[in-house]
Image (cartoon, coloured by chain):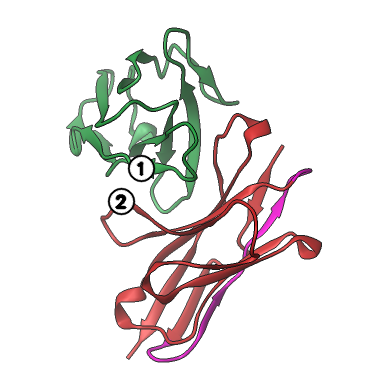
Chain colours: A green, B red
């Protein structure tokens, strides 16, 4: 399975600032996804990161708040913009390789907004 | 839209006893089904997955799950629980027709009594 490096692993940020999270995969992958896990909650899909085109966002998530880049088949970033304490969550990157039966998750970024 | 329900928010089980976690899904076609485990402060680890074929799936750490199409269920079982199995368990459903994105259930927290 693919190996994912997600950075940073955790951060404490001031409200109103932005944080960019990186997801690096050790091999080319077809699908890359970004999830949010709010405290004590399950995982919610934010968006699908599309290589060479704009990300596809789920209901309740918008590009202005969560801009996503995917410049190639091994790398993606998620930015959490204009943060508020409600954005305090774990953010996870997930990938699926073409033809592979399964998804791999990064170790997550634990974000605290103060 | 696909959805996943885990009816039990918490389950407490004695060490050595059997464990069954329930998962029900809603989707028109046969989805991909997964069980993940998340230990405190840790990332997601895949326990097992079902794509097609034999409806009884064996996973890691002694877990198994059975896909029952008639009941839209994918329950997770372990015959004898170890203290290290205390964690949060998530059922997830994905489908090619849904862009291969995963939808997660709300999770079941398992506590193991000595």
Q: Up-down: is B69 above or below A34? A: below
The C terminus of chain B appears in which quarter of the rendering?
bottom left
Residue under the image location 27 percent in, 55 percent down: B42
Near mark 2 (Cα within 10 A), the count class, few <14, some 14-19 or many ≥20, is: some
Q: CA distance from mark 1 to mark 2?
A: 7 Å
Q: Which residue is mark 1?
A: A105
Q: Up-down: is B68 above or below A107? A: below
Residue under the image location 30 percent in, 51 percent down: B43
Give the image quarter of residue A73.
top left
Instruction: Name, please, the residue furthest toward the top.
Output: A53
Q: Chain of mark 1?
A: A
Q: Give A54 or A81, whichever is nearer the viewer.
A: A54
Residue under the image location 74 percent in, 59 percent down: B72
Give the image quarter of residue A93.
top left
Q: In x, y percent, where is residue B6?
A: 60, 61
Q: Up-down: is A68 above or below B20? A: above
Q: Answer yes or no: do the residues labelled 1 and 2 have beta carbons within 8 Å?
A: yes
Reply yes or no: does residue B17 show up in magenta: yes
Please tell me whether mark 2 sits on a helix, a strand or a loop: loop
Q: Give A8 or A39, whichever is nearer the viewer.
A: A8
Q: In x, y percent, where is residue A40?
A: 41, 54
Residue B111 is tagged as none
Q: Nearer the viewer, mark 1 or mark 2?
A: 1
Reply yes or no: does residue A96 show up in magenta: no
Q: Chain of mark 2?
A: B
- What segment carries the magenta color? B14-29
Residue under the image location 45 percent in, 85 percent down: B13
Q: In x, y percent, where is residue B111?
A: 40, 77
**Image check: A81 left or right of A48?**
left
Q: Which residue is mark 2?
A: B43
The N terminus of chain B appears in which quarter of the rendering?
top right
**Image check: B102 left or right of A77?**
right
């Amino acid at each position: 399975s693919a190996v994912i490096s997600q950075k940073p692993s955790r951060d404490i940020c001031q409200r109103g600032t932005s944080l960019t999270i990186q997801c690096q995969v050790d091999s080319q992958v077809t699908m890359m996804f970004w999830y949010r896990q709010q405290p004590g909650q399950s995982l919610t899909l934010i968006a699908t990161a599309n290589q060479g085109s704009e990300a596809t966002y789920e209901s309740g998530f918008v590009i202005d708040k969560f801009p996503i880049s995917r410049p190639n088949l091994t790398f993606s970033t998620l930015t959490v913009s204009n943060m508020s304490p409600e954005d305090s969550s774990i953010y996870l990157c997930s990938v699926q390789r073409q033809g592979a039966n399964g998804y791999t998750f990064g170790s997550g970024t634990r974000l605290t907004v103060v | 839209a696909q959805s996943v329900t885990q009816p039990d928010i918490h389950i407490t089980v004695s060490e050595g006893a059997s464990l069954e976690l329930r998962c029900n899904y809603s989707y028109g076609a046969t989805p991909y089904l997964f069980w993940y485990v998340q230990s405190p402060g840790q990332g997601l680890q895949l326990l097992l997955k079902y794509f097609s074929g034999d409806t009884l799936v064996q996973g890691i750490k002694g877990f198994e799950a059975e896909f029952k199409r008639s009941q839209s269920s994918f329950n997770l079982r372990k015959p004898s629980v170890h203290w290290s199995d205390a964690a949060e368990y998530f059922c997830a459903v994905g489908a090619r027709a849904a862009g291969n994105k995963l939808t997660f259930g709300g999770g079941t927290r398992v506590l193991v009594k000595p």
